[in-house]
Image (spheres, rainbow, N blue to C red):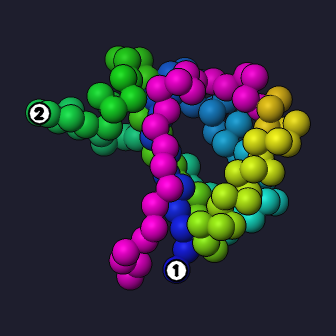
Amino acid sequence: MNYVEGFVAAVPAANKEAYRQLAAEAAVLFKEFGASRVVECWGDDVPDGKLTDFRGAVKAEEDEAVVFSWIEYPSKEARDAANQKIMADPRMKEMGASMPFDGKRMIFGGFAPILDV
């Protein structure tokens, strides 16, 4: 079964196209280094919760949208190897220098699927 790395971030609505372009460039690297699928989703129905919610998790401000993304890999080992290569790649370092959102508020993690229908 695949391995999934998930991300949630707050992105200024005015930076939607810049984010999409950055995500498209980064997806090329992720796939080059072993990802089988990269999905980027722009929030359009992200309700406020009573206790917690996506917006609160990334401290989204009123003018920001929540982005929910995931990258699929053939295995956790493939993800780990890809991340080492990606983080050492000068193209990724260049992209990281001009991100159209606050990367400090991004949350992420690796997940082992337990159901895939």
Q: Judge left or right: residue 43 versus residue 33.
A: left
User: How far separated are the C-alphas under marks 1 and 2?
Assistant: 35 Å
x then y, percent, for residue 14: 55, 21
* Residue displayed at 73% across by 29% down: 96
Q: Quadrant of the C terminus?
A: bottom left
Residue 50 numbered mark, or none? 2
What residue is shown with label 1?
1
Note whether 62 is above or below 86 in the view shown: above
Q: Is residue 42 visible?
A: no
At label 2, the amino acid type is Lys
- Quadrant for residue 16, please give it: top right
Task: Assess whether residue 8 is covered by the magenta stretch.
Answer: no
At label 1, the amino acid type is Met
Q: Is residue 46 visible?
A: yes
Note whether 28 is above or below 48 in the view shown: below
Residue 75 vs residue 98, the one in the foreground: 75
Q: Residue furthest right?
A: 90
Q: Secondary structure at mark 2?
A: loop
Residue 40 vs residue 53, the one in the foreground: 53
Specify the segment rendered in magenta. 95-117
